[in-house]
């Protein structure tokens, strides 16, 4: 995907507010050992031969032992979720027929990253060549959500307003406690492996509008820092080809219900940020260094920790991270009522908390992952009525 900076405003001028696209990344696994296996091409070819709907919805990611499915553009959240449910059911049926299992945690807990082959596409060959170890080490799995936002200058300002929200979304979605066959002690090891290692990744600076962001992109192009826009990996970014705000901070979710709830939360946050901007509502714009403090707290402790309260003038007050969902629900209540978005979380604990409790009770990393894979199979493989 090359960079057409000058055409981007026209893409967003034609965009429609609050359309939704959902992207989920799954680990491709040996069904017995649950090790990563490089079977992406087999799944893609099988889909092309037997299921054109699925074939149009799957795409490669960095490694051959990973597969992504996309809902495509839904006119609203409910349409996108319905499409994604259908594609999920098709993918899991195909995987079973091809003798592979699928996993949905932010990292694979024990497969050796050194044994994973990079997918053979021009984009990922370029990523691997440019980033070397940083790319090869990145065996991670994410949930991305696109939300349509009309007007590119407005979209950049929406991204600015979402910066302090990113740690809350990460705390809620944390789902990767183990990596390299050991307990990392983190709730989102994926964030440490990917977000903290890749360039132009994590919490972006506030840009204040499209002109400053365009200047930044021109600088990256002119200095040969990037040759395509997808090399800008910020955890929230305007997607110049789709006319969306893309939120990229979340671990992939172990259960379908969690994934759909997380998508609903993200859509509500983007839409409420846009409404607040339109209505010129006050916005606390903390420096990046403060947002990074909360990001660290979220990746280290998840919903078991505490976050800095930016509503406190002195910024010395803390609140339980488990209150993050309630805070976001309260903030987004107006737009959720407008768009009929429900953000009820489906389980008492998120993925990382369930993993942590199993490990604390004496489960091995392998036993913990096996339980997670069963949860994923039980919930993603079924098309639930919308």
Image (tube, grey):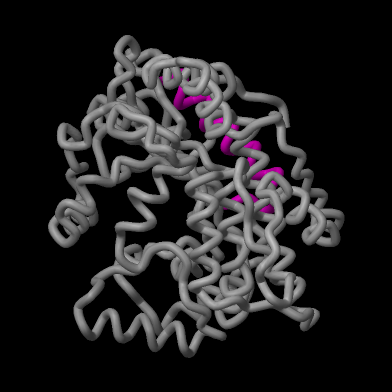
Q: Residue furthest top?
A: 32
Percent across and percent down for residue 340 are 82, 49
- Residue 53 falls inside the magenta stretch: no
Residue 206 in sight: yes
| Main secondary structure along the magenta-highlighted residues | helix
Q: Is residue 252 left or right of residue 123?
A: right
Q: Quadrant of residue 80?
A: top right
117 in relation to 312, above or below: above
Q: Which residue does the image show at 30% across and 40% down from the upper left?
A: 139
Please provide the residue range marked out in magenta.
73-94
232 in relation to 329, above or below: below
Q: Which residue does the image show at 46% across and 88% down from the upper left?
A: 212
Percent across and percent down for residue 260 are 64, 39
Residue 42 in sight: no
Percent across and percent down for residue 83 are 60, 38
Q: Which residue does the image show at 63% across and 51% down from the upper left?
A: 306
33 in relation to 36, above or below: above
Q: Nearer the viewer, residue 331 or 341?
A: 331
Q: Nearer the viewer, residue 157 or 190?
A: 190
Q: Quadrant of residue 35?
A: top left
Quarter of the picture containing the N terminus is bottom left
Q: Nearer the viewer, residue 200 or 296?
A: 296
Q: Which residue does the image show at 21% across and 42% down from the upper left?
A: 119
- Residue 92 falls inside the magenta stretch: yes
359 in relation to 220, above or below: above
Quarter of the picture containing the C terminus is top right
Q: Is residue 139 left or right of residue 325?
A: left
Percent across and percent down for residue 281 are 79, 79
């Amino acid at each position: 995907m090359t960079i057409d900076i000058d055409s981007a405003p026209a893409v967003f001028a034609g965009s429609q507010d609050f359309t939704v696209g959902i992207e989920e990344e799954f680990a491709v696994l040996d069904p017995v050992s649950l090790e990563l296996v490089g079977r992406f091409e087999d799944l893609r070819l099988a889909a092309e031969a037997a299921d054109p709907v699925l074939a149009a919805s799957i795409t490669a990611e960095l490694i051959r032992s990973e597969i992504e499915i996309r809902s495509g553009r839904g006119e609203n959240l409910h349409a996108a979720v319905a499409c994604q449910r259908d594609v999920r059911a098709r993918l899991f049926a195909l995987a079973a027929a091809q003798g592979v299992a699928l996993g949905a945690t932010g990292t694979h807990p024990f497969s050796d990253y050194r044994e994973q082959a990079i997918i053979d596409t021009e984009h990922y060959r370029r990523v691997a060549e440019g980033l070397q170890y940083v790319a090869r080490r990145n065996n991670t799995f994410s949930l991305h959500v696109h939300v349509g936002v009309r007007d590119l200058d407005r979209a950049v300002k929406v991204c600015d307003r979402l910066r302090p929200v990113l740690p809350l979304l990460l705390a809620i979605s944390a789902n990767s406690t183990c990596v390299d066959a050991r307990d990392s002690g983190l709730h989102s090891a994926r964030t440490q492996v990917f977000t903290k290692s890749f360039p132009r990744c994590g919490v972006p600076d506030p840009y204040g509008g499209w002109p400053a962001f365009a200047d930044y992109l021109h600088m990256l192009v002119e200095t040969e820092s990037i040759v395509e826009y997808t090399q800008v990996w910020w955890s929230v970014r305007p997607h110049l080809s789709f006319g969306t705000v893309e939120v990229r901070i979340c671990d992939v979710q172990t259960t379908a219900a969690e994934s759909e709830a997380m998508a609903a939360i993200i859509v509500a946050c983007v839409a409420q940020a846009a409404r607040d901007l339109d209505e010129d509502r006050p916005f606390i714009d903390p420096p990046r260094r403060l947002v990074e403090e909360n990001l660290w707290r979220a990746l280290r402790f998840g919903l078991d920790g505490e976050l800095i309260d930016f509503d406190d003038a002195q910024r010395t007050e803390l609140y339980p991270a488990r209150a993050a969902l309630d805070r976001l629900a309260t903030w987004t209540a107006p737009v959720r009522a407008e768009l009929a978005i429900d953000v009820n979380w489906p389980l008492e604990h998120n993925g990382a908390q369930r993993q942590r409790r199993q490990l604390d009770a004496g489960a091995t990393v392998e036993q913990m992952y096996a339980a997670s894979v069963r949860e994923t199979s039980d919930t993603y493989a079924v098309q639930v009525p919308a």
